[in-house]
Image (tube, grey):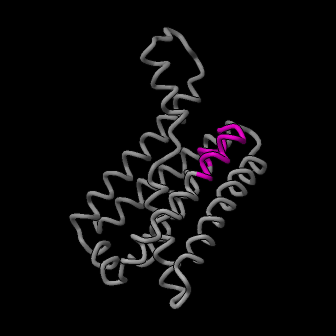
Amino acid sequence: MDYVIPLLASFIALSFLLKIGFYPRWGTWLTAGCCAIFVWLITPWATEQSKTEMMAFFASRHQMLDMSVCITLEAVAMITFCFDCFAGMHIRNTMFKQTVTFLLRLYPGLLIGGVLCYVLTQALFAFPGTDFKTLSWIAAIATFLFICLGAGLLRMITSNEALRLELLFIVNLFIIVLSIVATGY
């Protein structure tokens, strides 16, 4: 379990970066700014967490099953986005299909919030004695830079949109498998 959670968090972050790679640059910057503000705002909550509480959360079978359902739903939304983009055919383009396509393109992934919470608490545990406000600002700036540079780098490395869609699909399949493994079955 000690290795599954960080690996799952890494795959969720990779999926998020691949997904926002489909946004225009200003959309990537806006999303990165929102994530940085989120990290800055959750610091008071993260400072109240303890290692034993976090270990108890990840050891609780019921909570891991709930988390696995949320992870699977988001992965299914990302896979649906991939299929929607691959379809490309707009035969019988109804208002419902246009709305679903718009929402799938707009949705960046909400599980990145959980990953940011996890990373922030791990950073707080790794640097004891550091001023929380300073660490909060450093984490927010690092989050902004990581998201902007990571999405840009992935966009540059995989300049072909079809390849990025395939990678997003495969990464989300791994996320589903890891969420099942994380439940302990």
Residue 122, x across and y down, in percent: 48, 78
Q: Nearer the viewer, residue 107 or 130?
A: 130
Residue 22 forms part of the magenta stretch:
yes
Residue ranking furthest to the left? 62
- Magenta residue span: 18-33
Image: 170 above or below 6: above
Residue drawn at x 29%, y 72% is 57
Q: Measured from the top left, where is residue 69 in percent x and y?
A: 31, 52
Residue shown at 32%/58% (left/top)?
Answer: 67
* Figure quadrant of residue 150: bottom right
Residue 23 in the image: state x and y as whole percent. 65, 38
Identity of the residue drawn at 24% across and 71% down: 60
Assign the N terminus to one quadrant of the image.
Answer: bottom left
Give the vertical position of 162 relative to 134 (above or below).
above
Residue located 61% across and 42% down the image: 166
In the image, taking residue 184 as reference, residue 40 lies left or right, namely right
Residue 84 picture location, percent across and down: 52, 28
Q: Between 166 and 85, which is closer to the camera in this rendering?
A: 85
Q: Which quarter of the image is occupied by the C terminus? A: bottom left
Residue 2 highlighted magenta (yes or no): no
Q: Is residue 9 left or right of residue 36?
A: left
